[in-house]
Structure formats: structure tokens, C-alpha cells
Amino acid sequence: MINIDELAAQAQEKAKDLGIEKFDIYGATVDENSVRVDSGEAKQVKASNRSSVTVRVWNSERTMGITSTTDVNPTGLELALKTAYEASFFGVKEQVPDFSPEATVPIANMSREKTPQVPVSKLIETLLDSEKELLGYHEAIASVPYNGLAQRDIDRFYINSDGAARAEGGSYTSIYLCTKTEQEEKKTRSATAFRIGRSLEKLDVTGCIQEAGEKTISHLDYQKVKSGKYTVVFSAEAFLSLLGAFSNLFNARNILDKQSLSSPESLGTQIASPLLSVSDDALHADNVAPTTFDGEGTPTRRVSLIEAGILSGFMHSAGTAQQMNASPTGNANLGAKVTVSPHFYHVFPGAAAEREYSLESANNVVFIDEVSALHAGVKALQGSFSLPFDGWLIEDGQKTSIDSATVAGDFRDLLKSIVFVEQQPELTPSGVCPRIWVEGLSITGE
């Protein structure tokens, strides 16, 4: 863990020597070990220690300069402060960023204990066992070409010349498995599974293997699907992928830059079915890697985005909050420009549904497990999408893998066409979300 008091004292001393009165510094370090295996042998072993530090300095003319460095020692800090100070005289003169008004607000339980990292040999052994078990799951599974097991220690800090000094650290471990099948006269099929935990001991490796194996088997006997309108069920991962692709709906920076499907006047309007509620919650109990403050030192919190279908809030930085007469929400990222992004989505039921739906009794329903090609198939400023997907056609509760198809529509129409939000949430890297049922989406078969 970084000694934040020592770092703050060093920064104050170097700033004073340079005649700098106003500055702030945000940084993060990541210590990571990761392994990959192939055909019973270790294929890749990587160890890295990465640091990223952003320094901002304001001069007497109230303009700001910014620079980045990888050094947090006194010499590195001094050079970064000096460079940012020199750059400040070329900074913008309008809408100059400032400290967050909440940068010095106390945060309870800010520091978290790290989990000791296990030897790399243990990572390799665990991943080799996972590959072996998955290869034995079914004779059609020929390989696990994409896989990885990684453990990371993360430290983050923020200090400024007004006395803010925040630091936190944590650990997490993740595993990724992707299968590949080989069957005579049949197309290659694949399936993926991912798990994340606070340590290798708490990582659900068995569940990851089982999910990858079961998905793979379910895709072996595939069929074409007729093009048409279907009731579609999105898995947690698929729905959150779409939500993330259209996050400009809630992003105050995008709204002010007129790069959003929303406007400042959109607050309080109905944008989705009353059955849906969404929040951004960095401190959610299921978030394995929570953050207690953002790049500007603002404490993170639960930010309500949609309440029972009503657009209830935006994600803000200090600057966007000031421009929109709101409060910062702890979603800022420092860089050449202060950007805004979500931490951890929490999707849950809003109003009570008039009718409940179940996959066990569903008929002529498409269940989408994963969407792909988001970079090419999403037009974020138009609201439209057309995406290939992996999934199944559900008929009388029985799943049949879909050979090749795309789902298309307008995301705003999709939100309003939600007919059921299940109760049971699923954990993904980007948030927790139950399965979402949407009526009347266009599915195009091969």
C-alpha cells in the first residue's frame, strides 16, 4: 500500500520549491501475474508492475496544465509538477477544470486489505487442471484455445494542494475459458465463461468450467432460425453489453458535448418500461473491485440512473456537475480531458410485473447469451444496433442452438419494450443484472 501521507508531504514540498500553489495528483499501480496454457503445457507466463500518474497544475492566471508520468518518487514528482506548470500557460481559458468540491470529504473504510498472491506455479497448475477437465467434458471439445488466469494487486491514490489525501488498495483474481469444438461435417462451435473473485481460493473455478462445458454442449446441435420478430431474453452479460454501448444516455460529459441520446431536459422523462430500474454502484456488495473515489478524489456512491422506467440521474464529474447545477457523482477519469464513465451497473426490477415469464415454459423465444461486434454494429448517437449473437431458440422450454443470426433494433425502443425483469441477478465483470425479456425484436437468420 502506498504511504499517502509521505507522498502528500513530498508533493507539497516539491510544489513549494517550484512556486506552485495549486495542484492535484491521481495515480494507480497494478502488480499482476497471469498465465495461459495450451494442450497441457504452460504457454505464457507474464508478470508486470504498471504505474500511471496524472498531475495537474494551476498557475496564477487560473489556467491549468496537465502531464502524466510513471514515477512516484520525489524526482519524478518534481519533474511532473514542473512540466505541468509550464504547460499551464498554454491551457484553455474557458471552462477550466477545478478541484472537486468533495475531494476533502472524509470517506469511511477507504483502505482494504490485500490478499497475498499465490505462486505462479499454483496458477499454472490450476489452469492446466481446468483445461484438462474441460477437454474431458465432452468428446466434441477439441481444445481450449483462449484461456487465462490472472491475479492483480491494485493501489490508487489522490492528493491535492488543499489537503486531500486518499489511498486504497485491493486484490482480485480472474479466470477466462473459451472452448472450441471439432465435429465431422459440422461447423466449429465455441463457448466462453468468466469468473472473478478476491483471491484464487475464493474464485469459482469449478463453476467456470461447468458453465463453459454446458454452453459448448448446448451449441453442438444447431439449427437455423427463421427471420422475424421474436420475444427475446437477454442474459445479464448481453444486456449489460448493450447498456454499456449506449451509456451516453446517462453520461453528463456526452450530453454537454451533444454526443448523447439524452439532453439536460431528459431528466424525469420515461425512457424505459416501468419494470426496469438501473443504477451505477461502485460500492455494490457484489463488486469484487470496488472503488471509493474517482480520479478527482470525489467519493463514489450509488447513482440512480433509471427508476421504474424514468430517467432519474446522470453520471457527473466535478466540471459537468457545475455546468448542470448538480453534484459530482464520483464517475470522473483524469486525462487530457476529464471524462465520465460508469463503475458497476446494478440492474433490478422496477414496478411489479403483471405477468411472470419463465424459460422453462417459453415457446418461440430467442435467448441471447452474448452479443459481439459491438464496435461495428452499434451506432451510439443514433440509438440503433445490429449485432451477431450466440444464443438459443426456446420451444416448449427446450433449447436449440441458433446457427448464425443477428439481432437488430433501436435501443430506446428496446428499453420501452421490456415485458419482464427477472428477480435473480447474475454477476458479470461490468455489473449485476437479471435476465431481461423484450418483446418484438428483429432477428435475422443466415
Image (tube, rainbow, N blue to C red):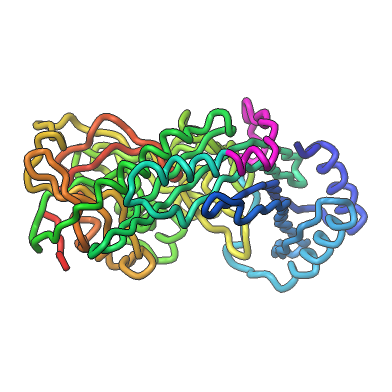
Q: Residue at x 59, y 51 (%)?
A: 41
Q: Is the residue 413 above or below the residue 444 in the image? A: above
Indicate yes or no whether the magenta region holds residue 242: no
387 and 146: which is toward the camera = 146
118 and 196: which is toward the camera = 118
Please provide the residue range marked out in magenta.
Answer: 101-125
Residue 30: give x, y in percent of width and height. Answer: 68, 48
Left or right of residue 391, residue 162 in this image:
right
Left or right of residue 88, residue 172 in this image:
left
154 and 176: which is toward the camera = 176
Q: Residue at x 50, y 54 (%)?
A: 340
Residue furthest toward the right?
A: 17
Left or right of residue 264, residue 364 in this image:
left
Left or right of residue 312, residue 291 in this image:
right
Q: Is the residue 24 above or below the residue 307 in the image? A: below
Q: Is the residue 21 above or below the residue 305 in the image? A: below
Q: Residue at x 64, y 30 (%)?
A: 110
Q: What is the magenta segment's predominant secondary structure?
A: loop
Residue 106: give x, y in percent of width and height. Answer: 65, 30
